[in-house]
Amino acid sequence: MPKTIKFYDHQLETIELRERSEIVLDLSEPGTGKTLAHAQHFLEHRSKGGGAGLIACPLSLVGSVWPVDMAKLDRGIDVSCAYAANRAEAFKPGHDLYVTNYEGLKYVEANWKKLKKELGIDWLLIDEGTAMKNKEAQRTKAATKIARDIEYKAILSGTLGSKSILDYWAPMNILDRGKRLGSVYSGYRSAVCVPVQVGPSSSMIEWVPRDGAFDAVAALVADISIRHELEACHDMPGIVMHNLQISLPKKLQKLYDQMAREQAIILAKGKIITAVNGGVAANKLLQIASGSIYDNDKHGEILDLQRAEIIADLCEEREHSIIAFLWHHQRDMIIHALVKRGRRVAYIDGTVSASKRNKIVEDYQAGVYDDILLHPQAAAHGLTLTRATTTIWASPTYNYEWFDQLNRRAYRIGQLNRCEVIVITARNTLDEHAYAVCTEDGVNMRDMFNAIANYR
C-alpha cells in the first residue's frame, strides 16, 4: 500500500520538474534525498497508467537502494533486481520496475526489441551518471540506443563534470539525442574547449575550457536541470577537512624515490603519456607511499605499518569512524591495527554481497561496530552512515567522484553532529599531488554547478 511520506520542499521541486519535463538532469548533491524524489515520480507515473521502469546504477546499489526506497513509498511496487547470474529471469514480464547494473545495459540493448514489447518500459533512470561520460564505452552506447525508444528519462549525478566540461556531452546525448549540446562530440569539444599542448610531442594534448564555456553549457541545459545543495536544503551541523601530513621512514622514502625515477624513465620512453600508463605509474607510487606494494602476481608486500597505527590512534579518539581504503593490503593492515586495540570493525568492498552489505550498514547505524572500512568503488554511493562523524582517508585518491561521494556517507540528512574529513598524505610523495588535484576538480565542478544554478 502507498505510504504517506513528508517530502522536503527541494524534493517536491524535483518531482514537479519531472512532471513537467520528460527528460531531467538532476545534479543535486549526495545526501539530499534525490533517489526518493525520483522513486516517487515513478510511483505516480505508474499509478497513472504509465509503463514499467528501468534503472541502471552501480552494482552496489542494485539491491540495496532502489528496492528499499520504493518500499518506503509503496510495498506493492514489484521491483526486479537483475544481476549477471539472473538477467534472463529478472527481465521477464510482470514487474513494475527493473533495476540492473551498468553492465546489464548491454544485455538489455541486445534484447531491446523483445524487452521493449514484452515489458512496456517507457521510464528510464541512470543513477550516478558519471558512468556514462565516456562516449566510446559499451555501457554508454547501450544506454544511448535504449534511450531513443523511451519517453521519460532522467540522469542523476552529484559529481558529473568533476574531471572535465566534456563529460557532459555523452549523458546529455542520452537524454536529448544532441538537441542541446549537439549530436557530434568533436563539434561540442571544439565549441567549449581549446587544445593545449602539455608535453614535448604535438600529440600530448589537453582540452582546456574556453572562457565562458561553463555559462554557455549551463544556459543550454538549464531548462531540464536541477541542482540542490545539502546545506542550502537543510540546517546541517557543518563539515571540516584536514590534511594530516606524515613523513615516510627513511628506508621507505628511499624506495619511493627509486620507484619514482624508474616510472619517470618508463613514461619518458613512450611518445604519449596516456591516462592508462600514467595511472599505472601513479598507482604504484601511491601504493608505496601507503606502506606496501604489489608484485606482478598481485601479492601485497607490507613495507611499513605507520599509517595503520596512525588511523588506529585517530579512531581511538572518536566513537565511530569511517575509513576509506584503496587496496586490500591497506584494508587488512588497518583492520589488524584496530582489532588489536579492541575496536569492533566491519568493512564493505567488492567482495561483500548485497545482503551482507545491508546488514553491516544496519548494524553500524545501531552501534554494533565502532568503525567501518569502505572501498570507494564499492561503497561511495547509496549508504547512510550517520552514526559516524569522522571520515578518514588512509590514502588520497585522484578520483574526485569517489572522494566527494564517500565523504557524504556520514554528512547527509539525519546527521546531527559536526563532521570532519581527515586525509592522510605523505610529504614529498605523489600523495600531495593527488590531494591537490582532487580538491581542484571539486572547484571546477562547482563552477559548472554554479553556472547552472544561475540559469534556473
Image (cartoon, grey):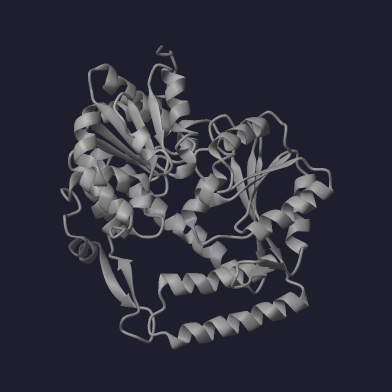
Vertical relation: 391 (above or below) 287: above
Which residue is most to the right?
341
Percent x, y for residue 313? 79, 52
Vertical relation: 181 (above or below) 278: above
Residue 258 location, quadrant: bottom right
| Residue 245 as seen in the image, left or right of residue 30 | right
**Residue drawn where x is 32% and y is 56% of the image:** 167
Percent x, y for residue 40? 36, 24
Q: Inspect this view and state whether residue 219 appears.
A: no
**Residue drawn where x is 44% and y is 44% of the image:** 58
Q: Nearer the viewer, residue 213 or 274?
A: 274
Percent x, y for residue 310? 76, 57
Vertical relation: 206 (above or below) 384: below
Q: Nearer the viewer, residue 155 or 30?
A: 155
Q: Nearer the viewer, residue 273 or 235?
A: 273
Quarter of the image that includes the N terminus? top left
Q: Inspect this view and state whether residue 242 appears.
A: yes
Vertical relation: 343 (above or below) 21: below
